[in-house]
Image: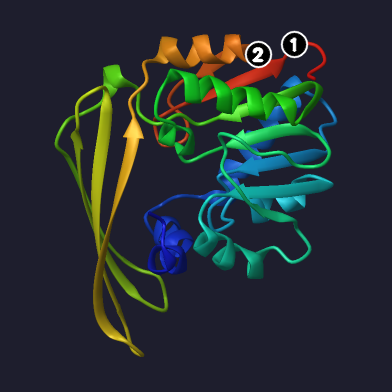
Amino acid sequence: MYGGEVAEIHDDLNSSRGKDYGSEAEYVTEVIRRHRPGAASLLDVGCGAGGHLEHFARLFDRVEGLELSADMLTAARPKLPGVPLHLGDMRDFALEGRFDAVVSLFGSVGHTRDEDELRGTLECFARHLTPGGVVLVEPWWFLERFIDGYVSGDVVETGRRTIARLSHTVGTGDAASAMDVHFLVADREHGVRHFSERYEHKLFRRDEYESAFAAAGFEVSYVEDVQGGRGIFVGVVRGEQP
C-alpha cells in the first residue's frame, strides 16, 4: 500500500486529474479559523506526499506531518524543508506538543478497521489538540452512498510523464471495500511501466462517524459536498484533554 512507485507520481497525478491542493488547503484553513480564530499550528495526519501540507506551511506558523508510508514521506521531504515529518500510525501515535488544528484528508481515516479503531483514532487526535482546538476529517465514502463495482479511469499528462490510472472498487463484506488500482506510467527515461496497488477501507455510516466524534470528546458538524463530494467533519474539542 502506497509504495515508492505510487509515492513518486501521487501528487502530480492527482493535480493533473483536477485536485487543487492549494485551494483545498485554503478552504480547510478558513473552516479551522472560523471555529478557532488565530489558529497558528497544524498537524496533518496521513499527510502522504505533502500535497496539502506544503500549502498549510504557508498558512500556519507551525506545521507537522504524520504518515504511515515511509515512501510517501520520502516523496514529501523535498517539498517541506524544515517541516517535521513523522513516520507513524494515525490510530496510536504520540508527538511532543499540541496543535490548534489536526486535519486528516483524502479519506485516510477510512483505513481504520472498525468503530473502536475509529473512536481510538479520534481520541488520539484529541490528545494532540490545544483546549478548544479543531479537528477536520475528510471521511471515506459513507456506507449509504457506496457504489459497489465503481470503475474510474483517467489518462493525464504531467509534463514529465503520461499516466493512465484505472480503478475498480467492490464491497468485500462486513461493510468494507477494496479498491484495485492499476497504473501505466510512460516517460522518456524508462519507457512504459505497469504497477498496481490495493486499498482497503471500512465503510462507516455517517451516524457512526458522528458517534465516534462524540465519544472522543468533540462537538461535531458535517459539511456536505466538499472535498470531491465526500464532505468534511469538523470537530471542536470539549475542554482540556489529558
Expressed as whole percent of the image width and height from the top left, the position of residue 154 reads 25, 57
**Quadrant of the rendered structure where residue 30 is?**
top right
| Residue corresponding to mark 2 | 218
> Relative to 220, is 128 above or below?
below
Task: Please report the residue visible at 48 percent of the width from the left and 33 percent of the height from the top.
Answer: 109
Residue nearest the viewer, comparing 45 with 20: 45
Image marks 1 and 2: residues in contact by CB distance under 8 Å: yes
Expressed as whole percent of the image width and height from the top left, the position of residue 72 reads 52, 60
Task: Please report the residue visible at 45 percent of the width from the left and 21 percent of the height from the top.
Answer: 224
The amino acid on which the numbered mark 2 sits, given as a three-letter code, is Phe
Question: What is the crowding at mark 2: few (fewer than 14 residues within 10 Å), some, or many (at least 20)?
Answer: many
Q: How is the rendered protein coloured?
A: rainbow
Instruction: Say the numbered circle drawn on residue 238.
Output: 1
> Relative to 147, is 156 above or below?
below
Instruction: Say the numbered circle drawn on residue 104.
Output: none
Left or right of 236 on screen, residue 154:
left
**Quadrant of the rendered structure where residue 186 is?**
bottom left
> Relative to 101, is 233 above or below?
above
Residue nearest the viewer, comparing 51 with 212: 212
The amino acid on which the numbered mark 1 sits, given as a three-letter code, is Arg
Expressed as whole percent of the image width and height from the top left, the position of residue 136 reads 61, 28
Locate the N terminus and report the quarter of the image it occupies: bottom left
Left or right of 109 on screen, residue 76:
right
| SS category of the residue bearing label 2 | strand
